[in-house]
Amino acid sequence: MEIRAFAAIAALSLIGQVAVASTYLCVADAAGGVSSSKSNVMTSQIFNHNPLKYIHTNEGGSWEVKPVGKDFPLIAECYSPDYCSRSSGTFYRFEDGTFTLLAFFGDGDGSVDSVVAMGRCSKIN
């Protein structure tokens, strides 16, 4: 009897986790920021926003932000369903369906791009 009760509770727990899973496709409409060369020359930039597409999801049990087509998260430390942050950047999804991403991309040669992207998120499940 106890095993059945435990199995039922475990099944309900899994159903509850699946029921609350949400996934958003977030696509940048614009991006700009600052490029810093390895010699610390800084210039303002308008970045190509076309490749800036992200999946914001909690399907794995915790919220994360992943580039579309990648298995690894860009930002995996989320403090709420709307706010994620770590050393590589910050992501905020607003109630009106828009988002802002601040991300840092390096070339490995000492240069860094600080990118601010803004766009829209659509719930896909």
Image: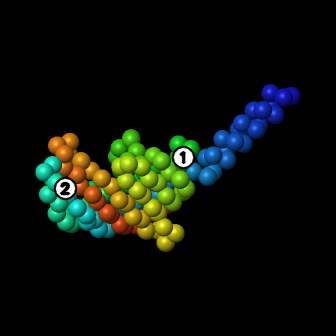
The residue most toward the bottom is 96
When the figure is inspected, residue 50 is found, relative to residue 11, above or below; the finding is below
Of the residues shown, which amino acid type is indicated by label 2?
A: Ser
Of the residues shown, which amino acid type is indicated by label 1?
A: Ser
Identify the residue shown where x is 75% and y is 32%: 7
- Residue 25 position, x and y percent, is 42, 58
Identify the residue shown where x is 48% and y is 48%: 77
- Residue 123 position, x and y percent, is 49, 61
Q: Nearer the viewer, residue 87 or 71?
A: 87
SS under mark 2: strand
Say whether residue 48 is visible: no
Q: Quadrant of residue 120?
A: bottom left
Which residue is identified by label 2? 36
Which residue is identified by label 1? 62
Say whether residue 11 is visible: yes
Rendered image coloring scheme? rainbow
Identify the residue shown where x is 19% and y is 66%: 44
